[in-house]
Amino acid sequence: MIVVMKEGCTKEQVDRVVHLIREMNLKDHVIVGTERTVVAVIGDDRYKDRTVLESSAGVDRVVPILAPYKIASRQTHPEPSVIPLGGKLGTTVGGRRICVMAGPCSVESRTQCLEVAHAVKEAGANVLRGGAFKPRTNPYEFQGLGEKGLEILAEAREQTGLPIVTEVMSVEQVLLVAKYADVLQIGTRNMHNFNLLTAVGKTNKPVLLKRGWSAKLDEFLLAAEYIIQSGNPDVILCERGIRTHEEYVRNTLPLAIIPAVKRESHLPIIVDPAHGTGHAYMVPAMCRASIAAGADGLMVEVHADPEHALTDGAQSLTPKAFAEMMKELAAVAAAVGRQV
Ligand code: PEP
Ligand code: MN
């Protein structure tokens, strides 16, 4: 349930509500908004007597929620969240400006990564992406450069000023990846890895949470809830396509999740049409569609020589195609009151 305090309630009244919640063996999460303070009650409150809270001074109403995610819900936090990514450029996700994350699928070498980093920066990208630890279906394929890849990404950040987002695959890797990355990426295969969600939730780095390819919307938001509940409010959702019967695409990209997330949650959502389609030729159209539908950002794979990329070449744009796409996106963004 959520306790909505009356406008102008006192701090003592909020403290009393917190005290009552703790007496019920439940946890509290106080959110002070510009006009209202609300207290989210965390834990199984289905059998608790909410009249105790309803009759406490300063309480306007107590709203039981069916949605199991509470802190990620729009009900507890009506205004959309704007997530700061750190770095010199003051990059954020969730505001008026569309945040474009671009770079290679994998960091393959220093030359390859730096070349793409400069090209995407030049074309207007806001964040550099690149995998150092790669979750590969086939154990005999390229697994990523590991820490060496993180060092290369850090050098690319140094040279371009772009914050970096890179995947962390296991609990043991969290401290290492957090030492280098500005944003920790949780891949689609790990969305249900609750120990990993809790571990990144204990860091102070923003988390890019990719939707599991068979996860439903409420499971996606509950995964975000794990991270926030562990102490880290800076979660960016990422739609990257789901598994369906279709074969003309690598995954099916359900853009209807954008308005659905906007209705259910205050968290920003970005779209990854590279993994969402698997084909470079589809990426620009799906990027335009994502922005038109209200996405807060994009994640795009870019490679100077896609034919020889070690991973995901077929869905990677060349730097030239990326730069052309960025120009087209500016017009779409302007049409929906956003900016690239
Ligand atoms: C990636 O971003 O390179 C990646 C592996 O993505 P996903 O987890 O969505 O497959
Ligand atoms: Mn990839």
Image (cartoon, rainbow, N blue to C red):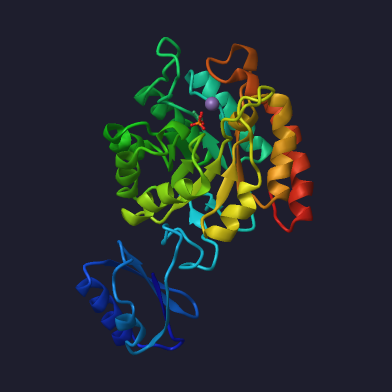
Residue at the spot 47% in from the left edge and 34% down from the top edge? 188
Of 175 and 12, the residue lying toward us: 12
Left/right placement of residue 203 relative to residue 251 reads left
Q: How many marks?
A: 0
- Residue at 30 percent across and 43 percent down: it is 199
Whether residue 99 is visible, yes or no, is no
The quarter holding residue 262 reads bottom right
Residue 52 seen from this side: yes
Q: Is residue 55 above or below residue 19?
A: below
Of residues 91 and 143, the one drawn nearer to the viewer in this rendering: 143
The residue sitting at 64% across, 58% down in the picture is 96
Q: Nearer the viewer, residue 189 or 80?
A: 189
* Residue 55 sits above or below residue 304 on the image: below
Q: Say which residue appears at 73% left-offset and 26% top-offset.
A: 281
Q: Quadrant of ligand 2?
A: top right
Q: Quadrant of residue 150?
A: top left
Tell me residue 205's x, y (percent): 38, 47
Q: The N terminus appears in which quarter of the rendering?
A: bottom left
Residue 288 horizontal/vertical position (percent):
73, 42
x and y percent of residue 155 in the render?
45, 31
Along the horizontal axis of the image, is 238 left or right of 16? right
| Horizontal arrangement in the rendering, residue 208 relative to residue 270 (left or right) | left
Q: Nearer the viewer, residue 122 or 28?
A: 28
> In the image, 249: left or right of 216?
right
